[in-house]
Image: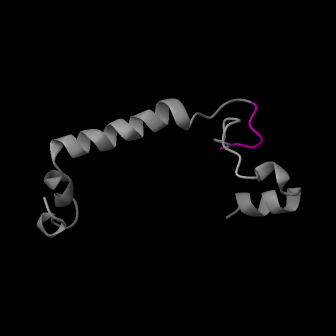
Amino acid sequence: TTFDSIPNGWAAVQAIPEAGLLQIISFVGLLELFVMKDITGGEFPGDFRNEFLDFGWDTFDEETKLSKRGI
């Protein structure tokens, strides 16, 4: 399958090979079940870090955190 053989719009979904579509759905399911859990005790609603991913969030001051949540 080449990119040129994939049509535009919703017809593109029909053109995805079954194995590829299964991989996409499996990956999204894996993320939903094991990675992107909304745990209780997060710092704010929607805090999906799960006490694992930080990326320096704890080093920001409150003003910077508020600004970044609004972006």
Q: How is the image coloured?
A: one colour
Could you say where residue 65 lies in the image, as x and y percent from the top left?
Answer: 79, 57
Residue at the spot 86% in from the left edge and 61% down from the top edge:
63
Q: Does the magenta run of residues contain 9?
A: no
Quadrant, the C terminus: bottom right
- Residue 26 horizontal side relative to residue 21, left or right: right
Could you say where residue 69 lies in the image, as x and y percent from the top left?
Answer: 72, 57
- Residue 54 horizontal side relative to residue 14, left or right: right
Quadrant, the N terminus: bottom left
Magenta span: helix, strand or loop, mainly? loop
Residue at the spot 55% in from the left edge and 38% down from the top edge:
36
Question: Where is 11 relative to 42, above or below?
Answer: below
User: In the rendered structure, which segment of residues is drawn in magenta?
Assistant: 41-46
Residue at the spot 11% in from the left edge and 65% down from the top edge:
5
Residue 25 or 54: which is nearer the viewer?
Answer: 54
What is the number of callouts on the image?
A: 0
- Residue 6 horizontal side relative to residue 27, left or right: left
Could you say where residue 9 lies in the image, as x and y percent from the top left?
Answer: 22, 64
Q: Does the magenta run of residues contain 45?
A: yes
Asked which quadrant contains residue 15, the reply is bottom left
- Residue 11 horizontal side relative to residue 48, left or right: left
Residue 1 or 63: which is nearer the viewer?
Answer: 1
Residue at the spot 76% in from the left edge and 52% down from the top edge:
56
